[in-house]
Amino acid sequence: MDRFFAPHVPVTSFVQIVLFSAHTGALLRRGQPCAGVQPLV
């Protein structure tokens, strides 16, 4: 999923997917930070 969002994030930022349970609020999964690839200009 991180790789899907990376093209929409500027190169000076990063995207990280974090999933929480809607029922318990418990952390289900934390993805690795992925650098953005969208050019600034």
Image (spheres, rainbow, N blue to C red):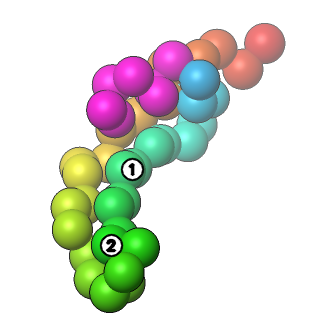
Secondary structure type for disc 2 = loop
The residue at the point 47 percent across, 28 percent down is: 5
Q: Is residue 3 magenta?
A: yes
> x%, y% of residue 35?
40, 34
Q: Earlier in the sequence, mark 2 or mark 1?
A: 1
The residue at the point 35 percent across, 60 percent down is: 18
Q: Is residue 41 magenta?
A: no
> x%, y% of residue 7?
51, 18
Numbered label attached to residue 21: 2
- Is residue 17 toward the left or the right of residue 39 in the image? left
The residues tagged by marks 2 and 1 sit, at their Cα atoms, a distance apart of: 17 Å
* Boundaries of the magenta span: 1-7
- Is residue 29 toward the left or the right of residue 6 in the image? left
Numbered label attached to residue 4: none
The residue at the point 26 percent across, 76 percent down is: 27
Q: Is residue 26 above or below residue 4?
A: below
Q: In front: 7, or 21?
A: 21
- Is residue 4 toward the left or the right of residue 12 in the image? left
Which image quadrant: the C terminus? top right
User: Which secondary structure class fits the magenta region best?
Assistant: helix
Q: In front: 3, or 38?
A: 3
Instruction: Check disc 1 and give the amino acid type.
Output: Gln
Q: Is residue 27 above or below residue 5?
A: below
Q: Residues within 10 Å of mark 2 (few under 14, many from 20)?
A: few
Instruction: Check disc 2 and give the amino acid type.
Output: Ser
Secondary structure type for disc 1 = loop
Residue 1 quadrant: top left
Numbered label attached to residue 16: 1
The residue at the point 58 percent across, 37 percent down is: 12
Q: Is residue 23 above or below residue 29?
A: below
Q: Nearer the viewer, mark 2 or mark 1?
A: 2
